[in-house]
């Protein structure tokens, strides 16, 4: 099992931190399709957070197609990309990149620095061919 870490002092909601930690582990290749996630109670205890927070995170992961719930067996990574329509995924990508670029600008970074940082972030990810076209 890959580690899921959160920062209770972060402004980002805890459930979003859990979602990102799982998605990040998958993207980096640190988590394998079919891998079982901890139960809601196990993860809540491990992270010292409310079980409802874990439930909300798992619901979002399931909605995004990252995990599948099997009654009585738990939650498992699917290894699939999002099932959302191409146009919806493209719009979401543009919104994410716009937000990142805006935040980077306000941190004082030049466009070339932002491009380089994005390239470095992509290099750290694990992509399995064939990749779904956007």
Image (spheres, grey):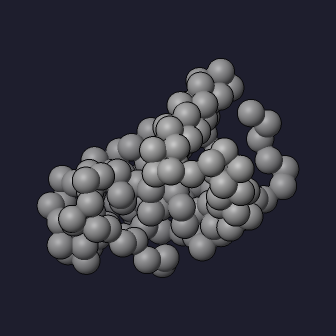
Say whether residue 120 is left or right of residue 75. Answer: right
Say whether residue 94 is left or right of residue 10. Answer: right
Say whether residue 117 is left or right of residue 25. Answer: right
The answer to which of 3 and 106 lies nearer the viewer is 106
Residue drawn at the location 32% of the way across and 68% of the way down: 6
Vertical relation: 108 (above or below) 38: above
Residue 85 seen in render = no
Q: Where is residue 117 in the image (x, y as percent from the top left)?
A: 65, 58
Residue 98 seen in render = yes
Residue drawn at the location 22% of the way across and 66% of the way down: 8
User: Picture quarter containing residue 75?
Assistant: bottom left
The answer to which of 22 and 63 lies nearer the viewer is 22
Residue drawn at the location 74% of the way across and 33% of the way down: 134
The answer to which of 28 and 78 lies nearer the viewer is 28
Residue drawn at the location 15% of the way across and 61% of the way down: 50
Vertical relation: 2 (above or below) 56: below
In the orientation shown, which residue stands out farthest toward the right?
130
Say whether residue 33 is left or right of residue 54. Answer: right
In the orientation shown, which residue stands out farthest toward the top?
87
Q: Position of residue 32 (x, y in %)?
A: 62, 68
User: Picture quarter containing residue 116?
Assistant: bottom right
Q: Where is residue 77 in the image (x, y as percent from the top left)?
A: 54, 59
């Amino acid at each position: 099992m890959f580690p899921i870490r959160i920062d209770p002092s972060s402004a980002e909601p805890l459930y979003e931190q859990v979602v990102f930690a799982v998605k990040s582990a998958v993207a980096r290749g640190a988590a394998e399709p079919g891998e079982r996630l901890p139960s809601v109670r196990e993860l809540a205890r491990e992270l010292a957070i409310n079980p409802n927070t874990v439930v909300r995170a798992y619901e979002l992961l399931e909605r995004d197609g990252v995990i599948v719930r099997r009654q009585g067996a738990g939650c498992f990574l699917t290894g699939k990309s999002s099932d959302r329509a191409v146009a919806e995924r493209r719009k979401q990508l543009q919104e994410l990149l716009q937000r990142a670029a805006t935040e980077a600008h306000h941190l004082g970074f030049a466009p070339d620095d932002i491009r380089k940082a994005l390239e470095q972030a992509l290099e750290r990810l694990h992509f399995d061919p064939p990749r779904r076209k956007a």
